[in-house]
Amino acid sequence: MSEVEGDRDGKGVLPRHIAIIMDGNGRWAKERGQARHKGHQAGAEAAREVIATAGELGVPVLSLFAFSSENWSRPATEVNRLMDLFRRALKQALPKLHENGVRVRFLGDRRRFPEDLQTRMAEAEALTADNQSLTLNICAGYGGRWDILESCRRLARDVAAGKLNPEDIDESGFAAGLSLADVPAPDLFIRTGGERRLSNFFLWDLAYTELYFSERLWPDFGGDALREAVTDFGERERRFGRVADNEGEASA
Ligand code: IPE
Ligand code: IPE
Ligand code: MG
């Protein structure tokens, strides 16, 4: 079954892949007169709950945007606090994730991360590589444009090496070089915090994704809010550029 035909007219179906921009931590903290990093801490708690709920629902793939390529431009103090939080959250959460059969992966350019964190990321991936219940993609240092360029570079290398004819480059060959190569494209995209933009999250992969925007700030977005979003998704009709089954013109 092709990706596009996956769940056409699939009312009530569960998304095979949910991608979330976890936005609004800073505003959540500000509303409470707290420093931004307190919001990030609360955000990590919310992530834990949403991961557990995705597992309970039986969603096969969950991608969480934790840190964008542009977030490196934030003040050094905030970036450093976030690195500390990644370190702690990973250490704390990993045993439970592994016990629950979660396969953890990190998507993004990790070369700018502190070396110890790069090592921990690789260790977490190796430890959980064979787990089967939920694939959890943590997008860190991730940018949709970076992802597309990585795939372009790979194809360019193959062409330069004489292994690939430019005329033979097609969508599936291109997609094979992207971070999400081995999982279905997101069926459902969620952004919390009220902004209605993609902020350089998955670009290629969101072509036919259903978009869902929540006004809730990320630390207030819990398991119930995820269930609401999944129910909303289940009521949508996806057409992928075609006409609904019952509305096609009878052939002459
Ligand atoms: C999202 O929350 C977390 C990261 C980008 C790391 P923000 O930090 O962007 O929170 P707001 O949007 O400023 O409220
Ligand atoms: C997007 O949120 C990135 C993450 C949530 C990790 P931002 O807060 O960085 O996005 P903008 O600046 O509002 O576009
Ligand atoms: Mg934000």
Image (cartoon, helix red, strand yellow):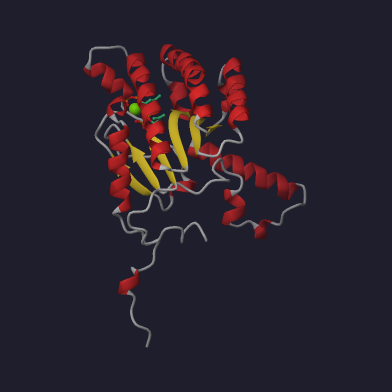
Q: In the rendered image, is residue 195 in sight? A: no
> 19 or 143: nearer the eye?
19
Query: In the picture provided, is 70 more to the left or to the right than 245?
Result: right
Q: Is residue 101 above or below residue 36?
A: below
Q: Quadrant of ligand 3?
A: top left
Give the residue at x 30% y 43%.
229
- List the single residue furthest toward the front: 99
User: How far from the left and from the top, in percent, is residue 59?
Assistant: 43, 43
User: How far from the left and from the top, in percent, is residue 195?
Assistant: 29, 35
User: Is the C terminus in the top left, top right, bottom left or bottom right quadrant?
Assistant: bottom left
Q: Quadrant of residue 151?
A: top right
- List the single residue furthest toward the right: 162
User: How far from the left and from the top, in percent, is residue 204?
Assistant: 49, 47
> 37 or 199: nearer the eye?
37
Give the residue at x 61% y 17%.
115
Q: Is residue 43 above or below residue 176?
A: above
Q: In the rendered image, is residue 166 in sight? A: yes
Query: In the picture provided, is 106 more to the left or to the right than 50?
Result: right
> 232 or 32: nearer the eye?
232
Q: Quadrant of residue 52?
A: top left
User: How far from the left and from the top, in percent, is residue 107?
Assistant: 54, 33
Give the residue at x 54% y 37%.
146
